[in-house]
Image (spheres, rainbow, N blue to C red):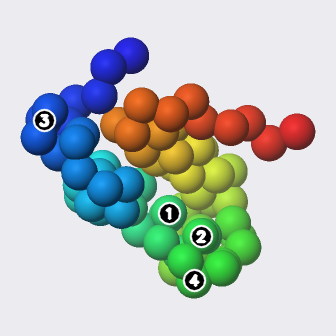
Amino acid sequence: MTSRLPVTVRRLPLRVRLAAALERLPESQRLVLALRLIDGLSPVEAGGALHLSAREVESRLSVALESVATELGTPARRAA
């Protein structure tokens, strides 16, 4: 799958491309990603903050990570 980012953005440094890819995520996915990966909340804690089940939090996180990986042209790594 090819990146949806414009070619000029794809040539920029990784952190700029990452910021652009994160901005393209739906807000619900960005919030889940931030709460889980930046704030370090558990799926239950993040779910409580967002009024979601822990399963929905993990589902949205998985979709968000896959989207970001696709935008960056890097396959997402699956947890073992």
Q: Position of residue 61 (x, y in %)?
A: 55, 52
Disc 3: which residue: 6
Q: Give yes or no for contact between labels 2 and 1 (Cβ–Cβ under 8 Å).
A: yes
- Three-letter amino acid code at disc 3? Pro
- Answer with the quarter of the image where residue 46 lies: bottom right
- 10 Å neighbourhood of mark 3: few (<14), some, or many (≥20)? few
Disc 2: which residue: 37
Who's the residue at 17% across and 45% down the image?
9
Disc 4: which residue: 39
Q: Give yes or no for contact between labels 4 and 2 (Cβ–Cβ under 8 Å).
A: yes
The Cα–Cα distance between marks 1 and 3, rounded to whole angstroms, is 23 Å
Residue 63 visible in rendering: no
Q: Position of residue 5 (x, y in %)?
A: 20, 37
Q: Is residue 53 left or right of residue 2?
A: right
- Three-letter amino acid code at disc 2? Leu
Task: Give the residue furthest to the top.
Answer: 1
Task: Give the residue furthest to the bottom.
Answer: 39
- Three-letter amino acid code at disc 4? Asp
Query: What label does residue 33 carry, if any?
Result: 1
Quadrant assignment for the N terminus: top left
Q: Nearer the viewer, residue 50 or 74?
A: 74
